[in-house]
Image: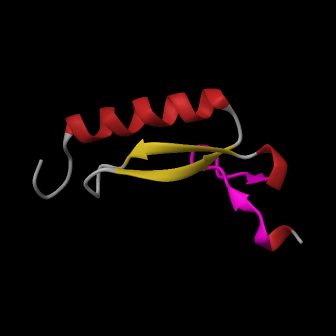
Amino acid sequence: MSFLKKKCEYCKNKIDKDKEIVRDVKDPVFIGTRPKNFCSKEYADNYGEKSSCCKESGGGCCG
């Protein structure tokens, strides 16, 4: 059933159950880390760099 598949946080594609990569990533909205699902190791590494870059650049109500 495709509606139960998890989505990749980086590319938003659906991931097969046996191929998902779960990694704890620092979330800029919350304090600490949260487990996120990715379809490849490269996307997991890029997501961490992208989220830290966005937090430093500001653009929110406090930044």
Residue drawn at x 77%, y 64% as measured from the top left: 5
- 44 in relation to 37, above or below: above
Residue 37 vs residue 46: left or right? Answer: right
Residue 44 vs residue 61: left or right? Answer: right
Q: Is residue 63 visible?
A: yes
Q: Which residue range is magenta in the image?
A: 4-15
Give the number of callouts. 0
Quarter of image, res 31? bottom left
Quadrant for the N terminus in the image: bottom right
Query: Any magenta on residue 13?
Result: yes
Residue 46: x, y in percent? 51, 29
Residue 28 vs residue 43: left or right? Answer: left
- Comparing 16 with 59, the one in front is 16
Residue 46 vs residue 52: left or right? Answer: right
- Comparing 5 with 32, the one in front is 32
Residue drawn at x 31%, y 39% as measured from the top left: 54
Residue 62: x, y in percent? 10, 54
Quarter of image, res 3? bottom right
- 56 in relation to 10, above or below: above
